[in-house]
Amino acid sequence: MILDDFSDRLDIALQKEMPDHVAIIMDGNGRWAKQRNLPRVAGHHEGMKTVRKITRFANELGIKVLTLYAFSTENWKRPRFEVDFLMKLPGEFLTTYLPELIEENVKVEMIGNFDALPTHTQQAIENARKATEHNDGLILNFAMNYGSRLELVNVVKRIGELAMTNQIELEDIDESLIESCLMTSHLPEPDLLIRTSGEIRLSNFMLWQLAYAEFTFTDVYWPDYNEQCLLEAIEDFQLRNRRFGCVDEEKKGINRKIR
Ligand code: FPP
């Protein structure tokens, strides 16, 4: 039987295991704009609308956490105009869509170096965080000024501090201690990583957390990414046999942690 009807496919996907945490590297905004002879920032602006679309659909799917890589610690190297534009997008997004996010029970969070963001960006994020802190639907987690290596450096510093102040012994350093120092310590690990635009790399994104995630890559540029694309990624995920290093089918999920 060929199932090409979106709602039939959606119904089937909803009956199967959903990833708890989907992480997306939203790539291809610049190329999307270039194809249309538009400035790069027009691609970012269109990408913002995709964020709204995908957030709503992820919530509908019952996904618990959606982490979106919105700005990396390396993105500061882009032209000043583009960086300024990207720093204004959370403000525009969260002002325009905050009522809808509240209504849809979405909780806004952020990982990354918050203190180094411009004040207006910090205020927009803080305002949305506060306004949605009691929501218990989808967690919309922006990775903003985020870099996995910097995160890990900070973990090492924190553990060093605990050791130097005799709060821990060497033997206390284990995976769970490291995880407790990550910015994602309160979240389940990503089950599914999606990268758009045909690039096949991680670009310093959640290097520790993605250890057992399933990866999917699509050629679609982020501004063109839609519900159909996410459903395809979920269907692909649902066909994977996750063994977490085990051979025994029954041990599937053994390492899966809901913190
Ligand atoms: C990578 O595409 C994309 C980014 C660095 C920015 C992603 C940001 C958004 C999609 C908007 C975020 C919205 C909110 C609400 C924060 P690229 O510019 O590197 O594309 P290219 O590789 O085609 O040049």
Image (cartoon, rainbow, N blue to C red):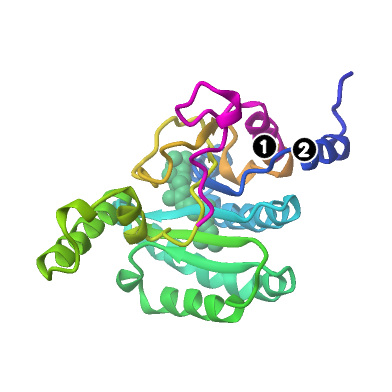
Residue 211: which disc?
none
* Residue 85 quadrant: bottom left
Is 258 one of the magenta-colored residues?
yes
Residue 234: which disc?
1
Across and down, in percent, residue 225 comes to 64, 42
Helix, strand or loop at mark 2:
helix
Residue 200 sits above or below residue 207 on the image: above
Question: Between 116 and 222, which is closer to the camera in this rendering?
Answer: 116
Question: Between 252 and 140, which is closer to the camera in this rendering?
Answer: 252
Residue 49 located left or right of residue 227: left
Q: What amino acid is at disc 2?
A: Ala
- Count of picture labels: 2
Is 23 one of the magenta-colored residues?
no
Residue 182 located left or right of residue 228: left
Point out the residue furthest to the top here.
Answer: 1
Helix, strand or loop at mark 1:
helix
Residue 27 sits above or below residue 99 on the image: above
Residue 13: which disc?
2
Q: Distance between the residues labelled 1 and 2?
A: 7 Å
Instruction: Name the residue rendered at 61%, 26% in the picture.
Output: 240
**Range shown magenta:** 231-259
* Residue 218 quadrant: top right
Q: Do the residues labelled 1 and 2 touch (CB within 8 Å)?
A: yes
